[in-house]
Every structure is written in structure tokens, then in C-alpha cells.
Amino acid sequence: MKQSGPVYDFDEVLGRCTRSAVHLEMRDSYAVDNESGRFAQWKSGHRYDPADRASWWRPWHDLIASTVRRGVAVRRARIVSEPVSEYIRFEYDGTFMNVAAGEFVRWLPRRNASDLALPGNDFWVFDGTIVRFGHFTGDGQYTGEEWTDQPAVAKLCVTAFDAVWERAIPHEEFKI
């Protein structure tokens, strides 16, 4: 799929949202640079204390919290293999941070997604009209993003997200 419009700035697009921002994650591991240090710490036994907000609150959480305060519903769904990977355990342990910022998070075991039509890449959809795909290598290294405002692509992603969301388990009920 070719880029169909200008390259957007994530923070600006999220800042202009008025209704919804949804994120579908489908990988069992990511090697995102800004998480590699925290993942290594987690593997060494470090866990954030939910009561010590100053130790884990980051600019990302401010961005999400301000978006939610404007009335935008921010939802994240994760499709995961079971048993879950070590990286998914790390994400699971830190999901309280997303929830504290105002995100709704759900988990869908991959075996329950077999009959869903899903795009080939993780994505965000903003107000049902702008899509940001994230591209990763096989070992999870982030290689870039692709933006589109093509109505058919946005509809595909919204439909896929809604199908996952309907089946997924709310974070507070999902056990690993």
C-alpha cells in the first residue's frame, strides 16, 4: 500500500482527536529502543510500584491523560499467543500505567482470532479516519510508520479492531 497523504505527527493527530483513538497490537515481542532498558530492568526483577506514580509516569501518560480528559476514548487491544512470551509478561505487568492514564486495554488470545480478518501490521486509528501502521522487523525492531487517510483502509482497520475488541478480555479479568 502506498502512502496516500502527508506524513502526520502522532502527537498532533492525537491532539486533534475528538472521539476515539484505537490501537491494535499483534506481535508477541517488540524491540522498541525506548523500552529496551525497562525490559532489561524488568527481566532483572525490577517492578514498578503502582502507588509510586512519580517513578513510572512518563510524557506518554500525560499525552493519553489529556486526550482522555477531552472526551476521547482511547482503547488498546493486544492479540497474544499463549503461553505468553516474556515480553508480553513485561507488557502485562506495566499495563496498569496505561490504565492509570485513562486507556481501556483488552487482551485476545491468538487462538480466538483465527477467523478474524486482520491487517498485516499493528495500527492506530484516529477518529475512524486516519490510520498509522507501525512496521517492525521479524525480531521486533521498529522500522518506521506508514500513514493513510484512505477511507477503505480506515474502515478495514476500524472493523478489525471492533471485532477484536468484542472478543477480547478486559485487562482486569485477563490472567497470564
Image (cartoon, grey):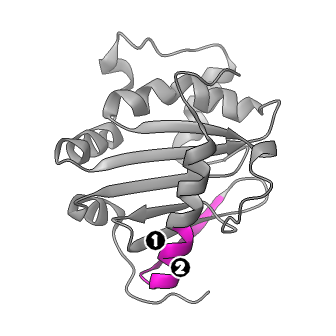
- Please report whichever mark, 2 or 1, sits nearer to the chain's N-terminal start: 1
Q: Position of residue 8 (x, y in %)?
A: 35, 75
Q: Nearer the viewer, residue 86 or 98?
A: 98
* Secondary structure of residue under mark 1: strand
Quarter holding the C terminus is: top right
User: Quick one: label 2, few (<14), some, or many (20+) residues within 10 Å?
Assistant: some
Badge 2 vs badge 1, beta-carbon distance below 8 Å: yes
Q: Position of residue 28 (x, y in %)?
A: 73, 44
User: Quick one: label 1, few (<14), some, or many (20+) residues within 10 Å?
Assistant: many
Residue located 60% across and 23% down the image: 41
Q: Please give the residue where the numbered disc 2 appears in the rendered image.
A: 153
Residue located 64% across and 13% down the image: 45
Q: Position of residue 152 (x, y in %)?
A: 51, 83
> On the rendered structure, is 68 left or right of 32?
left
Q: Nearer the viewer, residue 75 or 14?
A: 75
Q: Position of residue 158 (x, y in %)?
A: 50, 65
Q: Please give the residue where the numbered disc 1 appears in the rendered image.
A: 131
* Secondary structure of residue under mark 2: helix
Specify whether residue 154 is painted magenta. Answer: yes
The image quarter in which residue 29 lies: top right
Q: Is residue 47 above or below residue 18?
A: above
Q: Which residues are magenta?
A: 142-157
For the residues labelled 2 and 1, the Cα–Cα distance comes to: 8 Å
Residue located 43% across and 46% down the image: 75
Residue located 40% across and 88% down the image: 5
Q: Is residue 29 above or below residue 38?
A: below
Mark 1 is on which residue type?
Val
> On the rendered structure, is 133 left or right of 120?
left
